[in-house]
Amino acid sequence: MVCPYCNNDMVKGRLVSSRKVTWEHPTIVMYSTNNIVLPGSSFWYGANVTTYHCENCKKMIIDYGLEAE
């Protein structure tokens, strides 16, 4: 994958956490149904999702619609 910010090649990997990972909108209360919980995230297990990392500009692209491979 090519980085949309700097056009360098990105490295495919996984974002792994021992805890649930959730994206929250700043104006939405915690545990809202509008928040995004990364795949694999639950009370007992952490997130495990495929990501692409740009070593040049230090950005990650996360496709939270796909389970980790």
Image (cartoon, grey):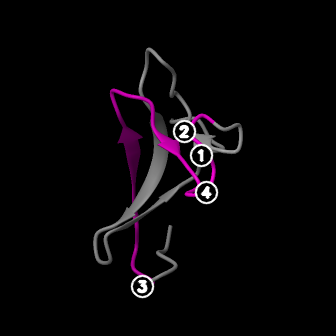
> Which one is closest to the eye, mark 1 or mark 4?
4
**x 43%, y 19%: residue:** 45
Amino acid found under the numbered disc labelled 3 = Cys
> Which one is closest to the eye, mark 2 or mark 3?
2
Q: If you read the primary sequence from the N terminus, does the residue marked by circle 4 or circle 3 appear first? A: 3
**x 44%, y 58%: residue:** 52
Q: CA distance from mark 2 to mark 4?
A: 19 Å
Residue count near mark 1 (Cα–Cα under 10 Å), binned few <14, some 14–19, many ≥20: some
Residues at discs 2 and 1 in contact (Cβ within 8 Å): yes
> Residue 38: which numbered mark, if any?
2
Q: If you read the primary sequence from the N terminus, does the residue marked by circle 3 or circle 1 appear first? A: 3
Q: Nearer the viewer, residue 25 or 51?
A: 25
Q: If you read the primary sequence from the N terminus, does the residue marked by circle 2 or circle 1 appear first? A: 2
Magenta stretch holds residue 9: yes
> Which one is closest to the eye, mark 4 or mark 3?
4
Q: Residue furthest top?
A: 44
Q: Which residue is mark 3?
A: 6
Q: Say which quarter of the image contains residue 33.
A: top right
Q: CA distance from mark 2 to mark 3?
A: 26 Å
Q: If you read the primary sequence from the N terminus, does the residue marked by circle 1 or circle 4 appear first? A: 4
Q: Which residues are magenta?
A: 6-31
> Which one is closest to the eye, mark 2 or mark 4?
4
Q: Which residue is mark 4?
A: 27
Amino acid found under the numbered disc labelled 2 = Leu
Q: If you read the primary sequence from the N terminus, does the residue marked by circle 2 or circle 4 appear first? A: 4
Q: Which residue is mark 1?
A: 64
Q: CA distance from mark 1 to mark 4?
A: 21 Å
Q: Secondary structure at mark 1?
A: loop
Amino acid found under the numbered disc labelled 1 = Tyr
